[in-house]
């Protein structure tokens, strides 16, 4: 009786409130609102505060069929170009008629970095846009943008992929991060995602912040909130090479197949190199960098990676590998100042997880 009555009421009301009933199935992020089977563009509007406001571009691909919500976010570092162009390609390629569930794409979080060609930080407040999650509304522009992304994207999604790559001054070989949380079901899915993505070197990123109010990184913000997430990196030193782009575009599609969001079989990487930790080599002072190794080179502990001279050509530092492992990225340009990262070495894990 009760069911019958509610059906009857729905039937009576439907013609009158058809729009609002229909509206319930729309998916909106910021000003981008898409009905099922549609793709919509818009902006996450970040109001002015202690400094200028901004509008972060967002695309919602609302699939014709129901399913989970996947967030794809890039351009926190606006000159990691391959990751940005990869999402631009995916915006064009994802067909809502083929999608089960919803994809939220943020192709460029750090707009001023991209436009002014400034690596690593948001030039408005000089902050990295992947270090201050979950953000706050009473902070500078980076804090407010990250707060809005946490609220509008992280809180709304079921899965998240954060895209990075070698910045203008980083010669990087492709790799992914997998951050296990200790929650078995969540870790199983995130591991499935990272294997489906297919990058052949995977960093096991443990010992991360667990306080939801101080999660620092985007993927960790999603992880701590119970959403399986990964980080992927490809591209280097301002280049946009087809192979690097292919890794990120095809990896995304394979991950979406693993999550059953598009038709087809995922392609899982079979024998990735699992890296147990990453060791930095930091410049002790300013100078000119002369590398002797390349991105992707495997080095022994103590091996000379390159040298640094003063501006008169005198060698002031021989940079040596503090551990055996693979060069994940290397300073790509001669400029070095004190505290700059000369190289990151990934140390192979004792065993696969
Ligand atoms: Zn980055």
Image (cartoon, rainbow, N blue to C red):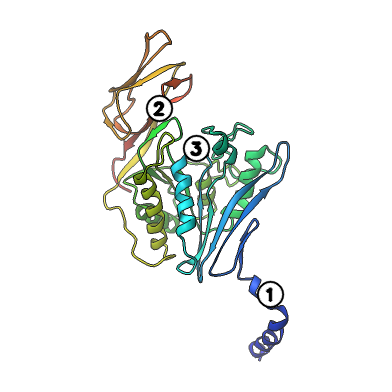
What residue is rendered at 26% in x and 49% in y?
A: 271
Asked whether the viewer can see residue 196, the reply is: yes
Question: How dense is the environment of label 2, judged by Cα within 10 Å: few (below 14), some, or many (20 and up)?
Answer: many
Asked whether the viewer can see residue 163, the reply is: no
Ligand 1 within 8 Å of the CB at mark 2 = no
Instruction: Report how many numbered discs are placed on residues in the image.
Output: 3
What residue is rendered at 39% in x and 20% in y?
A: 289
Query: Residue 248, percent across and down?
Result: 40, 49
What residue is rendered at 39% in x and 47% in y?
A: 245
Q: Which mark is residue 79?
A: 3
Of 309 and 219, nearer the camera is 309
Query: Residue 58, percent across and down?
Result: 58, 53
Of 196 and 184, nearer the camera is 196
Ligand 1 within 8 Å of the CB at mark 1 = no
Of 303 and 104, nearer the camera is 104
Label 3 and label 1: CA atoms lie apart by 42 Å
**Nearer the N terminus, badge 3 or badge 2?**
3
* SS state under label 3: loop
The image quarter in which residue 277 lies: top left
Label 2 and label 1: CA atoms lie apart by 56 Å
* SS state under label 2: strand
Left or right: residue 48 versus residue 220 is: right
What residue is rendered at 40% in x and 36% in y?
A: 236
Question: How dense is the environment of label 1, judged by Cα within 10 Å: few (below 14), some, or many (20 and up)?
Answer: few
User: Which residue position is annotated with label 2?
Assistant: 331
* SS state under label 1: helix
User: Which residue position is annotated with label 1?
Assistant: 19
Left or right: residue 15 versus residue 114 is: right
Instruction: Say which of marks 3 and 2 sits in front.
Output: 3
């Amino acid at each position: 009786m009760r069911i019958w009555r509610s059906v009857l009421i729905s039937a009576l009301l439907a013609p009158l409130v058809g729009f609002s009933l229909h509206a319930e199935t729309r998916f909106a992020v910021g000003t981008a609102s898409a009905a099922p089977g549609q793709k919509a563009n818009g902006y996450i509007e970040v109001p002015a505060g202690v400094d200028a406001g901004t509008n972060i571009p967002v695309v919602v691909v609302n699939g014709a069929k129901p399913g989970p919500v996947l967030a794809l976010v890039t351009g926190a570092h606006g000159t990691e170009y391959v990751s940005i162009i990869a999402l631009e390609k995916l915006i064009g390629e994802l067909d809502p008629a083929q999608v089960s569930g919803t994809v939220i794409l943020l192709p460029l979080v750090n707009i001023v970095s991209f436009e002014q060609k400034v690596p690593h930080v948001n030039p408005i407040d000089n902050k990295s846009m992947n270090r201050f999650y979950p953000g706050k509304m009473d902070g500078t522009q980076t804090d407010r943008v990250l707060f809005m992304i946490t609220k509008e994207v992280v809180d709304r999604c079921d899965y998240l992929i954060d895209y990075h790559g070698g910045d203008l001054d980083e010669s990087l070989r492709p790799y992914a991060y997998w951050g296990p949380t200790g929650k078995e079901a969540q870790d199983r899915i995130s591991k499935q995602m990272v294997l489906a993505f297919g990058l052949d070197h995977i960093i096991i990123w443990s010992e991360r912040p667990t306080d939801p109010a101080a999660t620092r990184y985007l993927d960790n913000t999603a992880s701590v909130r119970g959403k399986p997430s990964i980080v992927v990196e490809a591209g280097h030193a301002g280049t946009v090479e087809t192979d690097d782009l292919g890794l990120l575009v095809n990896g995304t599609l394979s991950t979406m197949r693993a999550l059953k969001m598009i038709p087809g079989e995922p392609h899982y990487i079979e024998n990735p190199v699992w890296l147990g930790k990453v060791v930095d080599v930091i410049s002790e002072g300013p100078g000119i960098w002369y590398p002797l190794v390349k991105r992707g080179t495997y080095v022994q502990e103590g091996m000379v990676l390159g040298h640094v001279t003063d501006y008169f050509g005198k060698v002031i530092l021989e940079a040596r590998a503090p551990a055996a492992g693979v060069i994940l990225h290397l300073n790509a340009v001669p400029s070095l100042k004190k505290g700059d990262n000369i190289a990151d070495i990934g140390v192979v894990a004792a065993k696969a997880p």
